Image (spheres, coloured by chain):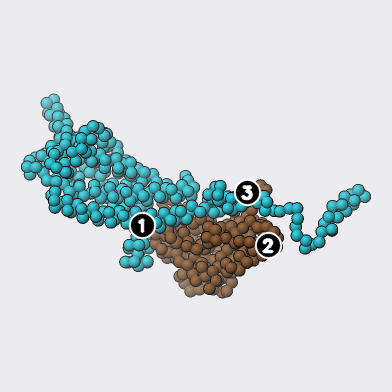
Chain colours: A cyan, B brown
Amino acid sequence: MIRILLVLAMMMAPAMAQRPDAPVTGFNPTTASVNEAQLLDALKQVNGRVSIPDKKSAVLIQPEGKNWRDFQRGVVPWLAGLLVLGTLAALAALAVFYVVRGRVMMEGGGSGETITRFGGFERFMHWLTAGSWLVLALSGLNLAVGKHVLLPLIGESAFSTLTALGKIAHNYIAFPFTTGIVLMFLVWVRHNIPNAMDISWFRQGGGLIGSAHPPAGKFNGGQKAIFWIVVLGGGVMAASGFLLLFPFSVTDIAGMQTGQMVHGVLALLMIAAMLSHIYIGSVGMEGAFAAMGTGEVDLQWAKAHHSLWVEEVEAKTKGVAAE
Amino acid sequence: MARVKFLCDADRCINCNACVTACKNANEVPWGINRRRVVTINDGKPGERSVSMACMHCTDAPCAAVCPVDCFFTTADGVVLHSKDLCIGCGYCFYACPFGAPQYPRVGNFGTRGKMDKCTFCSGGPEGEDGSAAEFAKYGSNRMAEGKLPLCAEMCSTKSLLAGDGEIIAQIYRERVQKRGYGSGAWGWKTAYKETVTV
């Protein structure tokens, strides 16, 4: 008992000796404490632990958000502006080209005989993709730059309603678009393997410049390029889009930011590529639209633009007839 | 007018979550929405610190810059507010926010987040009269209109969380650090306001 009291007295002695207002010495609680600047330097963000179910809220500070902000505010409108102005300039140039070069016309005016270029299913999957692309491109552009273009024109309330509808359309039309991409890949990939003929096709300017008609199969070099741009670009668009459609299910905030950036930049590039595809497939060349319109093209046109494909088809039909 | 800010003195925060509870009660936010949260860094290790975090009402707010429908605005007090009438629930503000402040009523698959909700510095929202039931239901309380500060800071048991005029709370923090001889800094200030409290 006495021993215990003695120990207690010894323990209390330093405490009694110290004046209550004396500064704390000997122990500095910050020497070991976490430091915001150090954490940000080392990890680029500050993470911790939270007791709430929302685990992504454990990220305390992520300054990368500001980089993403700068990308949205700086790069996106600039790139979209470049695209829009670039397209306008390209269209102006094409108009000049159109006047100088004229339409890529059929030589000899056509034979009157037709050949089936694209069957019903091929046309269906093309227009499924094209139709959904149109909605996705417009609603996507609206999300990216609509507040600089459309908002001042129609007012904040109407613009918000329109953008909300656009968002819903964008999210759900992603599915038919992806279906179209997958179908086109499966059906057309065997005609789109690049080969040596494509190099000579490109070397001869594809018939757009000059009057030569380099030989080509079902798809020429330019069409193969469009095919791979659509399949690979569309594939990455779909993958990054689905990532955004299921926020934080497979990645963290940095992944979501990167996914959105990839989605946005690639979308702008794809829109630029598709505009030229639309030009050459419609006004740019006589007879081209019929391929995706009715599916029937003039035999003369087919022989000029896809000579090897016509030979292949004719060989096949003759073979069937001979049996 | 004063430029209001939050400051969490991490050396005083004891992770009691009274601020979180006060916020939920003052604003009657739905389950799952956390306008304020407490994050513990180095949990269980020496030098552990807890920081109470909500919207910091940033200078040049990233959320406002990325909003596709421009639904954000900054009040004369420097409070960053948004209009739930205009919000389309795209989730961009969450990607841009350095502090994870924007909250959504739903998980967000297929873009079904619902209207964004966040700390309003207890300043209500743009629609409905100040202090009206309609404003309360949509945005929570408007204590600022009554001349009161946010309830989280008012209720802080250790007075770790400070809310109010940025100059004044910075001065309070500075005096504390000078008196006790240490301080781990004003968490998030550099990111939110491009300045920190120098002692």
Q: Amino acid at mark 2?
A: Gln
Chain letter behind tag 2: B
Chain letter behind tag 1: A
Label 1: state its secondary structure.
helix
Is the residue marked by circle 3 packed among few (<14), some (14-19), or many (20+) residues within 10 Å?
some
- The residue indicated by pointer 2 is B178
Label 2 and label 3: CA atoms lie apart by 25 Å
Give coordinates of residue B93: x percent, y percent.
Answer: 46, 57
- The residue indicated by pointer 1 is A77
Q: Which of pointers 2 and 3 lies earlier in the amino acid sequence?
A: 3
Q: Amino acid at mark 1?
A: Pro
**Rendered view: B13 above or below A300:** below
Q: Is residue A21 left or right of residue B154?
A: right
Label 3: state its secondary structure.
loop
Give coordinates of residue A72: x percent, y percent.
Answer: 41, 55
Same chain, labels 1 and 3 = no
Chain letter behind tag 3: B
Residue B21 in sight here: no
Of badges 1 and 3, nearer the viewer stands 1
Q: Residue at x 41, y 50 (%)?
A: A260
Is the residue marked by circle 2 packed among few (<14), some (14-19), or many (20+) residues within 10 Å?
few
**Rendered view: A128 above or below B120:** above
Same chain, labels 1 and 2 = no
Q: Residue at x 65, y 58 (%)?
A: B183
Q: Amino acid at mark 3?
A: Asn
Label 1 and label 3: CA atoms lie apart by 40 Å
Quadrant in the picture for residue A208? top left
Label 2: state its secondary structure.
helix
| Disc number placed over residue B42 in the picture, else none | 3
Q: Is residue A302 left or right of residue A51?
A: left
Residue with the most extreme front position: B199
Label 1 and label 2: CA atoms lie apart by 47 Å
